[in-house]
Amino acid sequence: MSKAKGAAKVAGVVGSPIAQSLSPVMHGAWIRAAGLDAVYAPFETTPGGFSSFIQGLRRASLLGLNITAPFKGQAARLADIRSQEVSLTGSANLLLFRGGQIEAHSTDGVGLIWALTTAGLEAPERAVIMGAGGAAAAALPALSRWGVREIIVAARRPSTAGWLRNVAAGVSVAPWEDLPDAVAGAPLLINATPMGLHGSSSPEVPLERMAPGAAVMDMVYRPLETPLLRAARAAGLRPIDGLDMLIGQGRPSFEALFGQPPDVRLDIRALLEQALAETTT
């Protein structure tokens, strides 16, 4: 966290839990590189207390907050002003406090495409997403704009996920048990569920049925190599961790909060990898 020198600009990130978030490390490094008198702090609240926490900040001197699990849907509903992306997906990962009003934005889709292109991918014809929550919803319009023509969402409760078909062109929803058929021949698989977070078990996915050289992305970054990515590597596929997605969504968030883009000369990924190593040993 950067040290403030007086009337500092203050922003942060809120989630539950929040202690292991790398957002304060990332934004703090960008703040120092820019020489800003600013602080980016972590905040934790309970699901039941999130609404009152946010409402209490309406007229505070806070610039805004990044939003992480499990509050992205609540953040979208609490806002007075919603970007087109938030209105479409019902998910917000950035709240800005402006003149007593709350603006909701989403940079998750930008972060996803940043991660995929940083890994050297071009838009495939088809992609499969595991999960039907806010992270998956935010991914759909971004993938469609990128050029993916067919997107299959594997949902545990497909009856309540049908609305995702209206979020972007070419989206279909499949029952979770149909995942083996969905990934057959697929060039891209994205895990948008918490499975794999902190090393928890990932679903059994027949990765051998995917297209040769297919890419498998896990949106989580702790650990960097989840069980799913380890299996993808063993199967000769291209594993993509969630760290570049964090960086990709953080860049426009930083600019929205502090009024200037982060310094691209800073090797932020190396810094975050070091922070991960220090907190997992």
Image: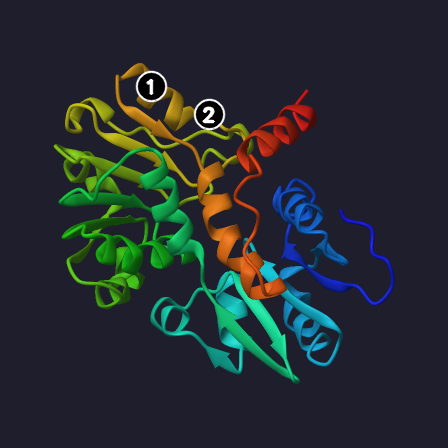
Quadrant location of residue 26?
top right
- The secondary structure type at the circle numbered 1 is helix
Quadrant placement of the C terminus: top right
Instruction: Determine the residue positioned at 64% across, 72% down.
Output: 51
Instruction: Determine the residue positioned at 43% across, 55% down.
Output: 108
Q: Amino acid at mark 1?
A: Arg
Quadrant location of residue 255?
bottom right
- The location of residue 195, given as percent across then percent down, is 45, 37
In this rendering, is residue 214 above or below 61? above
Instruction: Determine the residue positioned at 20% across, 24% down.
Output: 213
Q: Give the residue pinned by disc 2.
A: 225
- The location of residue 171, given as percent across then percent down, is 19, 57
- The location of residue 113, given as percent across then percent down, is 34, 47
Instruction: Please give left or right for residue 86 compared with residue 251 in the image.
Output: left
Instruction: Please give left or right for residue 218 compared with residue 103 in the image.
Output: left
Instruction: Please give left or right for residue 112 compared with residue 147 in the image.
Output: right
Q: Amino acid at mark 2?
A: Glu
Color theme of the render = rainbow
Q: Earlier in the sequence, mark 2 or mark 1?
A: 2
Instruction: Determine the residue positioned at 17% across, 42% down.
Output: 124
Instruction: Please give left or right for residue 205 compared with residue 93 in the image.
Output: left
Classify mark 2: residues with Cα within 10 Å, few (<14), some (14-19) or many (20+): many
Classify mark 1: residues with Cα within 10 Å, few (<14), some (14-19) or many (20+): some
In this rendering, is residue 271 above or below 148? above
- The secondary structure type at the circle numbered 2 is loop
Q: Give the residue pinned by disc 1.
A: 233
- The location of residue 40, given as percent across then percent down, is 71, 55
Tag 2 and tag 1, C-beta contact below 8 Å: yes
In this rendering, is residue 64 above or below 280? below
State the separation of the CA atoms marked 2 and 1. 10 Å
Disc sitting over residue 192 in the figure: none
Query: Which residue sits furthest right?
Result: 6
